[in-house]
Amino acid sequence: MAELRYPDRIYRLQQTLRRRKLDAMLVTQPHNRRYLSGYRAADHGIQETAGVLLIPAAGQPLLLTDSRFHLQAGEEAPGFRIELYPRGLKNRLQQLLPRLHVHRLGFESDYMLHATALKLQAMADRISLTLVPITGLVERMREIKSEEEIKAIRKSVQRNEQVFQLVYNTIEPGMTEQEVALALELTMRELGAEAPSFETIVAFGENAAKPHAVPTDRVLRTGDLVLVDMGLVLEGYCSDMTRTFVAGKPDRTFRERLRVVRRAQLAGMEAIRAGVTCREVDRAARQVIARAGYGEAFGHALGHGVGLAVHEEPRLSSRSKKKLRPGMVVTVEPGIYLPGWGGIRLENMVVVREDGCENLNQDTTFLDI
Amino acid sequence: MAELRYPDRIYRLQQTLRRRKLDAMLVTQPHNRRYLSGYRAADHGIQETAGVLLIPAAGQPLLLTDSRFHLQAGEEAPGFRIELYPRGLKNRLQQLLPRLHVHRLGFESDYMLHATALKLQAMADRISLTLVPITGLVERMREIKSEEEIKAIRKSVQRNEQVFQLVYNTIEPGMTEQEVALALELTMRELGAEAPSFETIVAFGENAAKPHAVPTDRVLRTGDLVLVDMGLVLEGYCSDMTRTFVAGKPDRTFRERLRVVRRAQLAGMEAIRAGVTCREVDRAARQVIARAGYGEAFGHALGHGVGLAVHEEPRLSSRSKKKLRPGMVVTVEPGIYLPGWGGIRLENMVVVREDGCENLNQDTTFLDI
């Protein structure tokens, strides 16, 4: 099965390239590169690539890289012809493309620097090549997960919940947000995660009013609410989960607000099934919060796709008319943010199925206060 | 002193802008942004910015960001006027630029996506703005470190060596590459580093033949060589160091090859002083390795600049005619990589001075086998 997934993805991409009258496509985005080839090397930012794929509309795909990655590329992408570029990528392309009879070359406009595109264009002019900017092509393939990918994501979600539970049991008044965040990230590594899938958010009390709070040295006091938003990367696949609870006994206000958020989350999950638009799902959850009088306090979209990237398509946003399809994996994360008081967000990940959704999270602590 | 560094940098940049007949410049590259403003927020990749600087050729500079970063921006960049862009950056620029009488706007061509530049151009057309692509302008300012910056880098290097020594003393047969890498990264965090400056490399035996090896579950056996390439970020500044040693008693082959690499490193350091070109330094080290018969086994450049970024200008490469200048900080890291056997790399960081170089590394264990 593992051997089939890359040829199948390449085959589908090649069909699209032929339909678009492209002779080949250059894949520079690291998650797209991994998705199509299995090559796992990480880039040090967009300026230091570990290699690019050159996918011809027919025939064997190529992985272009430098000598540092030669062995790794050969091991991880066995279906690819590995080509090195000792004199730079543009130089190598200038030799390769005419030999491969490439006249129209697609490139990822949303993962190529303006400066690089200028140089690529100068090279293209020398060999009468037409460059065609492409956006979102492989990203759209990545939206629909195979059962094998869903298995990997489920594993990532389960590991993330394990980490959360281990650290949750050690949280006590006197700890700072930074200490809790560090404990979470250390535990992720100890339990085998490659990395956190994003910078862990831990916010106490009024700090939770910022949806993207960065952990501070704020000390936990009894009665404070605690918001934890965390995820990890396992075998390439990301998880993302948020829980909000109280250090000690939750008061009535907290309980009421948590219930609103939880009901919004359930309404969102209820609305998810193949064929429904993203904005319908967002609206189903948003209505619950608005009716409880907190409409203004929920400023972000309801959710986003998760896969090789922690934020990917589709977006469960009030503006998206995209229709959900089976195999999409999205977060459902309504929230209420009240400056001066704090914030509550609950986030699960679900798989879109034909007639509903499958909740990937098992952790239900705090959800039924 | 700390208060003076940002106004001084802005002043020097504004002089350059006026010389180039630019009315303003948009700074999107996160290290450049921090270098000019003190604003420390991190971007989640090039597609999710924490804000951009708008530096007019004269007058107060602006920091444009969104509501999530409003407080942080004001605290960290007190000399800047903070502007939010609730309806997006392009929209805000379209209002601001005519008011600031900006007709020619520079932008960082090597830190703007092709797709973003297309959208910016569409906006520019609406307000008769000329966009001027700029490359390497702030990066060239960053090449030369002030004594204050060198102090910060020295501190980062020392902390990195401390971490190395602590973990080195715990390495023993039976551990995996991943376990050693994890111990290094945990110790970095415990000793106050913000983060590793790149993914820590730990490679045993034949795995060290890959210059950019990713740690695996390969178990350490007595007699294996161990290559560790590690760095951390402390107060924004990076360190980067490589050591290669043996678990147990090094055999003759290892000792000979280590000596070749060490002599190459010393030859490189010897060649460094203000006025010498980067390629002369690369050649001085490369010759030693070539004469010992390992020329083919040294496939990468001799070194690179280090500062706010772990890889920055200048590059000690065989192709670079750039002249070294006092205050540049570079790595000197020759290596020999032999598939099937393993690899040896030694890496120190040095400051370029008028008549030589200052070695920032104190750690000399293993260098005199």
Image (cartoon, coloured by chain):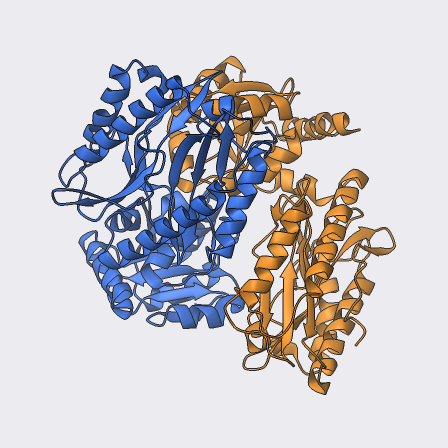
Chain colours: A blue, B orange
Residue A125 appears anywhere in the view: no
Residue B29 image offset from top left, x and y in percent: 55, 38
Q: Quadrant of residue A321?
A: top left
- Residue A275 lies left or right of residue B330; in this view the side is left
User: Position of A87 compared to B273: left or right?
Assistant: left
| Image quarter in which the N terminus of chain B is found | top right
Relative to residue A163, is residue A22 drawn left or right?
left
Q: Position of residue B113 (x, y in %)?
A: 44, 41
Is A170 displayed left or right of B123 in the figure? right
In front of the other: A360 or B324: A360
- Count of all numbered marks drawn on residues in the image: 0
Near-viewer residue (B173 or B51): B173
Classify B333 as above or below B173.
Answer: above
Query: A234 or B320: nearer the eye?
Result: A234
Residue in the image at 26% along x and 64% along y: A5
Can residue B246 be seen at all in this image of the molecule? yes
Residue that lies at the very extreme toward the bottom in this rendered image:
B252
Residue depicted at x 56% and y 56%: B199
Residue B359 locus on image (x, y percent)? 81, 57
How far across and down, in percent of the image, does residue B2 sit? Answer: 76, 29
Q: Residue furthest right?
A: B355
Q: Quadrant of the C terminus of chain B?
A: bottom right
Above or below, A142 against B138 in this view is below
